[in-house]
Amino acid sequence: RLETFRKAGGGVTAGDAEISANPRARSARLRAAIRTEAPARAGDFSIFGLPKLPAVERPGER
């Protein structure tokens, strides 16, 4: 499998001021990635358990 993204450096964590204002920020980490030239993978949305919806007929289309 070809990589579709590569890491762009390390993650960024919250500073002391943000952690004191929002204690949950202590466990947060912001990460970034750069898209590669590899084609995107097909999504498997069946893992979400969403119901299948009927097709919608739009006015003027047949």
Image (tube, rainbow, N blue to C red):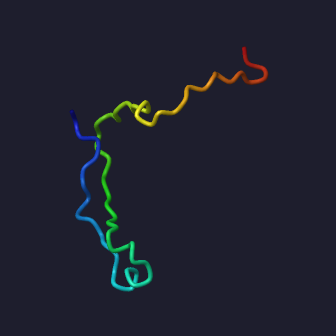
Q: In which quarter of the image is residue 12?
A: bottom left
Q: Residue farthest to the right?
A: 59
- 7 on left or right of 59: left
Q: Which residue is drawn at 27% across and 65% down?
A: 11
Q: Which residue is drawn at 44% across and 33% down?
A: 45
Q: Total number of numbered labels?
A: 0
Residue 1 % position (x, y): 21, 33
In front of the other: 15 or 53: 53
In front of the other: 25 or 40: 25
Q: Residue at x 51, y 33 (%)?
A: 50
- 60 on left or right of 28: right
Q: In which quarter of the image is residue 38?
A: top left
Q: Residue farthest to the top?
A: 62
In front of the other: 43 or 50: 50
Vertically, is 41 above or below 58?
below
Vertically, is 34 above or below 41?
below
Residue 13 % position (x, y): 31, 72
Q: Which residue is drawn at 78% across and 23% down?
A: 59
Residue 43 % position (x, y): 40, 33
- 34 on left or right of 21: left
